[in-house]
């Protein structure tokens, strides 16, 4: 499940902090990759369709809204905003619309590239003209919306948060997965946890890693996640003759276990808003290398909690990795500082409580208008 999906699951906990009852609707096609376990945990109602061209969901979602009669209708991601606008035509119940904003739409494939400008236009229209209020997951994202002429008073920044305590036995998980991946304890395992599409910059990480393998044999790389680039990245590694040095795990539901197995976490993204994967690495007390994009530096700061490098720069990434793995004291200092900053600012409790307060405020204001 991507960042937007994880966000939607997390804020389902607002009922712990305020008298709010949440009902989640999720439109799904049977062949779509999805974390069904998380959807079951929040008792999401699944609206099953045959394909993207099957518009039967419109009437069914409108019927659910009329049955639930919510005070607030909250949407996540471009598809969610569009669904809210379309079903608004069919529903009899005029729920006040609010939303979360996670940044610009980045097409996962060339075929969907033409949709980027359309989705961004529709999202901005929704935030500007339809949404009563919007939660932005970073100051960076808010500033972007304001630059597009959207009233800053309509936007509340609430950073992403995750559980303070990962459900993992670090030592056992580390031993088990490193044995499974054939990584010796004296080897240094680099890793990235990401959706595998171009915007995540994995190709630059592989280029940097290839350069490093020419200098040392003690490094291995774990690419944790799946996406439309999965096959092409594996083919690239095969061509480079690095199949014994790079582990492609595919989709993993045990991300905390995977992080325990790593020695260094790398986020080579070309664009981010407020990365949950970065927060997970901070919680796991990993030394971090991250690109200077979006809201990354709202989470970690250069030389304080991480090494921050320019995006799309495999040479800078190579130098950062080499510096980090050759300085154990630096690794310990950065990992400790990152964990402390996570605990201070980015826990689920902080995020969800702020979101609950915002929802109550939106609901009270909507009732008084």
Image: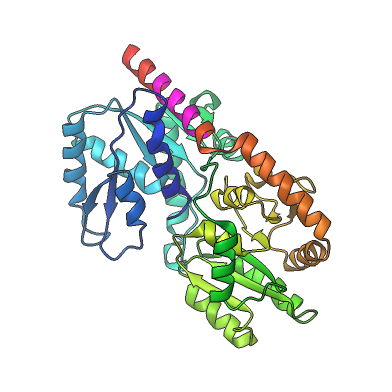
Is 229 situated left or right of 130 in this image?
Answer: right
Is 280 situated left or right of 68 in this image?
Answer: right
> Quadrant where the N terminus lies?
bottom left
Is residue 120 magenta-colored? Answer: no
Query: Residue 232 location in percent, x, y?
Result: 51, 78
Viewer-nearest residue: 175 or 211? 175
Viewer-nearest residue: 110 or 310? 310
Query: Residue 312 location in percent, x, y?
Result: 68, 63
In the displayed structure, 64 sits above or below 325; it is above
| Residue 114 in view | yes
Residue in the picture at 40% in, 43% down: 8
> Quadrant where the C terminus lies?
top left
In the displayed structure, 200 sits above or below 367; it is below
Is 319 situated left or right of 228 in this image?
Answer: right
Label total for image: 0
Q: Main secondary structure of the magenta part?
A: helix
Viewer-nearest residue: 280 or 135? 280
Residue in the picture at 24% in, 59% down: 53
Viewer-nearest residue: 120 or 15? 15
| Magenta region | 351-361
Q: How is the image coloured?
A: rainbow
Residue in the picture at 77% in, 48% down: 302
Query: Residue 163 location in percent, x, y?
Result: 51, 42
In the displayed structure, 222 sits above or below 274; it is below
Residue at the extreme top? 368
Query: Residue 368 location in percent, x, y?
Result: 34, 12
Quarter where residue 21 is shown: top left
In the displayed structure, 251 sits above or below 345; it is below
| Residue 300 in view | no
Residue in the picture at 19% in, 38% down: 64
């Amino acid at each position: 499940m991507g960042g937007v999906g994880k966000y939607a699951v997390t804020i389902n906990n607002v009922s712990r902090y305020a008298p709010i009852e949440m009902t989640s609707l999720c439109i799904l096609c049977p062949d779509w990759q999805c974390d069904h376990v998380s959807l079951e945990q929040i008792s999401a109602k699944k609206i099953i369709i045959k394909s993207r061209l099957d518009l039967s969901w419109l009437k069914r979602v409108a019927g659910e809204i009329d049955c639930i009669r919510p005070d607030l209708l909250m949407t996540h991601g471009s598809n969610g905003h569009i669904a809210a606008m379309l079903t608004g035509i069919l529903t009899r119940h005029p729920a006040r619309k609010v939303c979360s904003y996670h940044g610009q739409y980045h097409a996962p494939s060339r075929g969907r590239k033409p949709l980027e400008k359309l989705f961004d236009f529709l999202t901005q229209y929704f935030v500007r003209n339809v949404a009563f209020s919007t939660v932005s997951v970073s100051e960076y994202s808010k500033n972007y919306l304001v630059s597009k002429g959207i009233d800053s008073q309509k936007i509340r920044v609430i950073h992403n948060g995750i559980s303070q305590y990962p459900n993992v036995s670090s030592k056992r998980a580390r031993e088990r997965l490193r044995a499974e991946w054939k990584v010796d304890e004296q080897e240094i395992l680099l890793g990235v946890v990401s959706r595998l599409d171009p915007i995540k910059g994995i190709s630059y990480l592989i280029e940097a890693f290839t350069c490093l393998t020419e200098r040392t044999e003690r490094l291995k790389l774990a690419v944790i996640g799946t996406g439309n680039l999965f096959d092409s990245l594996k083919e690239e590694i095969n061509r480079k003759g690095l199949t014994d040095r790079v582990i492609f795990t595919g989709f993993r539901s045990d991300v905390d276990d995977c992080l325990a197995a790593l020695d260094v976490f790398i986020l080579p993204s070309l664009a981010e808003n407020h990365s949950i994967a970065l927060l997970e690495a901070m919680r796991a007390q990993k030394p971090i290398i991250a690109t200077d994009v979006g809201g990354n530096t709202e989470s970690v700061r250069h030389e304080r909690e991480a090494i921050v490098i320019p995006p799309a720069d495999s040479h800078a990434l190579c130098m950062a990795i080499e510096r980090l793995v050759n300085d154990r004291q630096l690794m310990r200092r950065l990992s400790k500082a990152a964990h402390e900053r996570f605990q201070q600012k980015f826990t689920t409790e902080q995020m969800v409580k702020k979101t609950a307060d915002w929802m109550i405020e939106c609901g009270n204001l909507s009732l008084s208008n």
